[in-house]
């Protein structure tokens, strides 16, 4: 690893918060007969394809809340829930604002905050990330959203935008994520990288070895582990 960074930029969905577990719990409570796991996965599976439509300019710039709603309208039909009215659909779509943190996230972030500037660098829009931070007690120093740059990760504009906002050199920023593609894109822009192992992101049982991504500067079992490796106790 290079010299210690001064800014840690975190992917959020799956890395800091448990989107799958939260959605499964809420959907399972609302619709007990539904396969909540399948519903959550169907919703998330269309996330990247919808962003690709924006990136290819097949859709104008569209914030994630609106993309989530577009996907929701389709999967409600697929899962036999087309009877939900507008208010019910709107409230269900806001589950993405209420995602719960992984057990190690808040404590790990608080330790990292003592030595680094910490912020999400997420495709989530600003209102979503703000409400999520409030709900899950995430102690960010500031919130960085793709909405600021009008580009979705892994577009270089997002990573380079952080450097511009903080007048930082690439080596002064570390991207932290549970997704190799995010880190590979950040690394191509010169950022340092830390992989967080989240084997339960999609539910089920761990299926990926913890050391599969030794290509990155750090490989960590949790955000607590990241704090330990960066010298924050």
Image: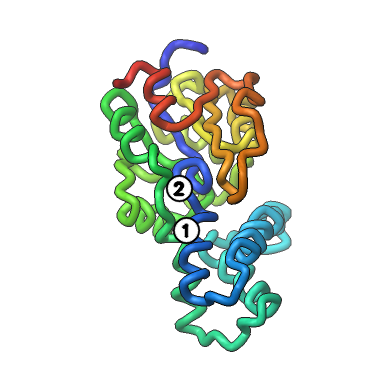
Q: Residue at 39% of width from left, 29% of height from top?
A: 224
Quadrant assignment, res 58: bottom right
Q: Is residue 96 left or right of residue 46?
A: left
- Answer with mark 1 or mark 2, whichever residue precedes in sequence: 2
Q: Which residue is mark 2?
A: 17
Q: Residue at 41% of width from left, 35% of height from top?
A: 165
> Which quadrant does the C terminus fall into?
top left
Q: Is residue 207 left or right of residue 120?
A: right
**10 Å neighbourhood of mark 1: few (<14), some, or many (≥20)?**
some
Quadrant assignment, res 118: top left
Q: Which structural element holds mark 2? A: loop
Residue 153, percent from left and from top: 60, 43
Q: Residue at 33% of width from left, 45% of height from top?
A: 138
Instruction: State whether residue 60 appears in this view.
Output: no
Q: Which residue is mark 1?
A: 22
Instruction: State whether residue 231 appears in this view.
Output: yes
Q: Residue at 48% of width from left, 45% of height from top?
A: 12
Residue 135, percent from left and from top: 33, 56
Q: Is residue 137 left or right of residue 64?
A: left
Quadrant assignment, res 54: bottom right
Residue 123 numbered mark, or none: none
Residue 31, percent from left and from top: 53, 76
Q: Looking at the image, how many numbered discs can be counted on the residues?
A: 2
Residue placed most toward the observer, 58 or 182:
182
31 in relation to 48, above or below: below
- Given contact means CB atoms under 8 Å apart, are the residues at marks 1 and 2 in contact? yes
């Amino acid at each position: 690893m290079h010299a210690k960074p001064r800014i840690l930029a975190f992917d959020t969905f799956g890395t800091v918060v448990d989107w799958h577990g939260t959605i499964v719990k809420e959907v399972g409570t609302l619709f007990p007969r539904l396969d909540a796991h399948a519903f959550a996965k169907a919703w998330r599976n269309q996330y990247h394809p919808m962003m690709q439509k924006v990136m290819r300019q097949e859709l104008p710039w569209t914030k994630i809340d609106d993309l989530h709603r577009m996907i929701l309208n389709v999967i409600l039909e697929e899962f036999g829930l087309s009877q939900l009215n507008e208010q019910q659909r709107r409230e269900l779509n806001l589950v993405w604002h209420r995602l719960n943190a992984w057990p190690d996230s808040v404590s790990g972030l608080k330790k990292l905050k003592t030595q680094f500037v910490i912020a999400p660098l997420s495709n989530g829009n600003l209102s979503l990330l703000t409400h999520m931070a409030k709900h899950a007690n995430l102690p960010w120093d500031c919130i960085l959203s793709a909405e600021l740059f009008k580009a979705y990760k892994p577009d270089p504009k997002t990573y380079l935008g952080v450097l511009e906002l903080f007048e930082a050199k690439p080596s002064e920023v570390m991207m932290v994520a549970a997704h190799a593609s995010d880190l590979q894109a950040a690394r191509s822009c010169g950022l340092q990288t830390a992989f967080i192992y989240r084997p339960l992101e999609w539910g089920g049982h761990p299926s990926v070895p913890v050391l599969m991504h030794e290509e990155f500067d750090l490989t960590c079992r949790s955000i607590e582990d990241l704090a330990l490796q960066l010298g924050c106790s």
